[in-house]
Image (cartoon, rainbow, N blue to C red):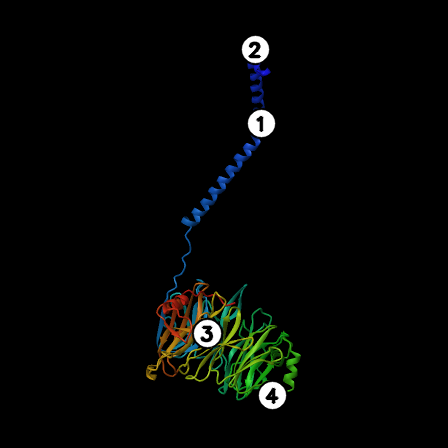
């Protein structure tokens, strides 16, 4: 059966064509209306496209300019090793690090006394009014050992402290303070070597200068920390306060009321209540004096200090102002971080103990034979402070790492050393531990063929992730006066600096200042196995030490 629409189309074909034409015309009109309604959106889309490509072009142009047209600043090349020699000279036990020339690499500052003149022959002792020989201060580039500045600074130097803040106009800079013999005071700009201030003086022939030079909060209101120098005449210890910005004495000299023995450095301790006290050994005891009391005595005025009632009760109850009785003579004092403030590590001839920083009660005590040198801090476990001590005589020396909070022995190793060996040090590593560096006798482990005549200092490296291994990095036969391991560039390379020279200041000789990159010494190092442990090959162990990454100290 034929559909009605098809039948009509067959009967009236023209009518059917007209209908299709009308339908097509209607569709075109609808499409035109739709196109007219979509025109603004099309324009917006084109604008967005243009904006996108314009932004892309600008970005590519900026990248091109930065990459190819504007030159990048040259990064200084740090040499793996450099060495400076001075003939007919003596070297001081002083070593400081600072980025002096602003190249992002730590530079080296040291003192020496030269019989002839400085290495660059531009400044002589007579130029500064000194007789020959005199003491020179020198700053050399940590990158290549070139001299940044060098000048005669004193006839002789008793002590020197750096990184004391100085105000210069609206800027804060760093300075080094020198106490010369017999008592001159000099401040040097750390970055230029220029003399900021200088004052002559004399303490008298029987007066000795105690180290270190203590830095006090600003007491004269000039925005610069001030200085406290302790001196000893006979048994009496006195203090002099000087302005850090001008070097002028504030008030007059005042006695601390304690009898010092001169064998141990003084310590400035801040109690948990914020009171400043000067601590120093006296016989087999720890004696103290408040900075507030000294300031009032030398100036007759009240200063920006306070006293701690608990400490004052302890001092007033003792005739000789003793805070603590020690088992044996006090040899070293150190401030260490505590839970509520500063705690104190006290080393005597018979024991090592951690004292509560407020009540001075022992947190732990370790009986020892004899601590050879001042302990150093580091991290054996991640983010957990440890203390390294050298216990025993030179031949019977034991390296010990203790947990600072509990006194637990974390690691120990017999490591004989030569008399007068350099101190140990540590560097933080990226795994929040520390690499430890200490000196001992060459061929000390597993060898019985060492001859005393050929005995040499050997530098050993230790990391807690390899507790049964030491790495012998270097051997030195010269007399070592000062040593330090330093992160010369942030997160890039660690190096050690060595000062060697005559053992006696009365016999001038060859003085050398040397820098070595630690990582470059590892491939040629000797692996020393301390006992049963990892079965890794020597090369695998060296590779692990080479992959160590270091971080700046907090």
Dot 2: element: helix
Q: Quadrant of the N terminus?
A: top right
Mark 2 is surrounded, within 10 Å at the Cα level, by few (under 14), some (14 to 19) or many (20 or more) other residues, namely few
Query: Which of disc 1 and disc 2 is earlier in sequence?
Result: 2
Residue 99, relative to residue 206: is it above or below?
above
Residue that mark 4 sits on: 320
Query: Which of disc 3 and disc 1 is earlier in sequence?
Result: 1
Residue 525, relative to residue 234: is it above or below?
above
x, y (%) of residue 473?
38, 72
Of labels 3 and 2, the one closer to you: 2
Dot 1: element: helix
Distance of label 1 from label 3 (alpha carbons): 82 Å
Q: Are marks 1 and 3 in contact (CB under 8 Å)?
A: no
Mark 1 is surrounded, within 10 Å at the Cα level, by few (under 14), some (14 to 19) or many (20 or more) other residues, namely few
Distance of label 2 from label 1 (alpha carbons): 36 Å
Mark 4 is surrounded, within 10 Å at the Cα level, by few (under 14), some (14 to 19) or many (20 or more) other residues, namely some
């Amino acid at each position: 059966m034929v559909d009605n629409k098809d039948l009509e189309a067959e009967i009236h074909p023209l009518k059917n064509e007209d209908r299709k034409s009308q339908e097509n015309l209607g569709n075109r009109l609808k499409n035109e209306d739709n196109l007219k309604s979509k025109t603004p959106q099309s324009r917006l889309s084109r604008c967005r496209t243009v904006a996108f490509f314009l932004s892309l072009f600008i970005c590519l142009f900026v990248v091109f300019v930065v990459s190819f047209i504007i030159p990048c600043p040259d990064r200084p090349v740090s040499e793996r090793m450099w060495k400076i020699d001075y003939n007919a000279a003596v070297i001081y036990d002083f070593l400081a690090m600072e980025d002096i020339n602003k190249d992002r690499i730590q530079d080296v500052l040291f003192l020496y006394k030269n019989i002839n003149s400085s290495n660059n022959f531009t400044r002589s002792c007579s130029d500064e009014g000194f007789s020959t020989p005199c003491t020179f201060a020198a700053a050399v580039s940590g990158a290549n050992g070139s001299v940044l500045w060098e000048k005669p600074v004193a006839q002789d130097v008793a002590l020197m402290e750096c990184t004391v803040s100085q105000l210069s106009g609206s800027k804060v800079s760093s300075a080094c303070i020198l106490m010369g013999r017999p008592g001159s005071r000099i401040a040097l700009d750390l970055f230029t070597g220029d003399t900021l201030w200088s004052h002559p003086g004399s303490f008298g022939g029987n007066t000795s200068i105690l180290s270190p030079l203590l830095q006090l909060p600003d007491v004269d209101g000039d925005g610069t920390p001030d200085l406290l120098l302790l001196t000893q005449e006979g048994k009496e210890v006195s203090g002099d306060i000087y302005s850090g910005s001008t070097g002028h004495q504030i008030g007059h000299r005042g006695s601390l009321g304690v009898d010092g023995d001169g064998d141990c450095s003084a310590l400035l301790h801040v109690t948990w209540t914020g009171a400043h006290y000067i601590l120093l050994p006296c016989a087999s005891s720890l004696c103290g004096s408040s900075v507030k009391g000294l300031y009032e005595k030398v100036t007759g005025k009240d200063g920006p200090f306070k006293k701690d009632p608990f400490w004052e009760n302890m001092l007033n109850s003792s005739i000789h102002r003793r805070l603590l009785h020690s088992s044996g003579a006090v040899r070293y004092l150190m401030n260490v971080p505590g839970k509520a403030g500063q705690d104190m590590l006290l080393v005597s001839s018979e024991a090592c103990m951690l004292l509560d920083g407020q009540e001075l009660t022992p947190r732990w005590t370790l009986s020892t034979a004899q601590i050879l040198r001042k302990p150093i801090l580091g991290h054996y476990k991640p983010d957990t402070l440890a203390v390294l001590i050298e216990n025993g005589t030179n031949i019977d020396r034991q390296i010990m790492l203790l947990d600072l909070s509990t006194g637990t022995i974390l690691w120990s190793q017999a490591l004989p050393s030569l008399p007068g060996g350099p101190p140990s040090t540590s560097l933080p590593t990226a795994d929040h531990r520390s690499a430890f560096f200490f000196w001992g006798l060459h061929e000390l482990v597993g060898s019985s063929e060492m001859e005393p005549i050929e005995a040499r200092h050997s530098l050993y490296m230790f990391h807690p992730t390899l507790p049964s291994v030491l790495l012998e990095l270097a051997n030195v036969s010269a007399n070592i006066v000062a040593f330090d391991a330093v992160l010369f560039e942030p997160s890039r390379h660690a190096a050690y600096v060595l000062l060697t020279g005559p053992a006696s200041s009365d016999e001038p000789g060859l003085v050398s200042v040397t820098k070595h990159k630690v990582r470059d010494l590892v491939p040629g190092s000797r692996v020393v196995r301390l006992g049963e442990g990892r079965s890794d090959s020597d090369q695998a162990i060296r590779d692990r030490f080479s992959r160590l990454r270091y971080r700046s100290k907090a």
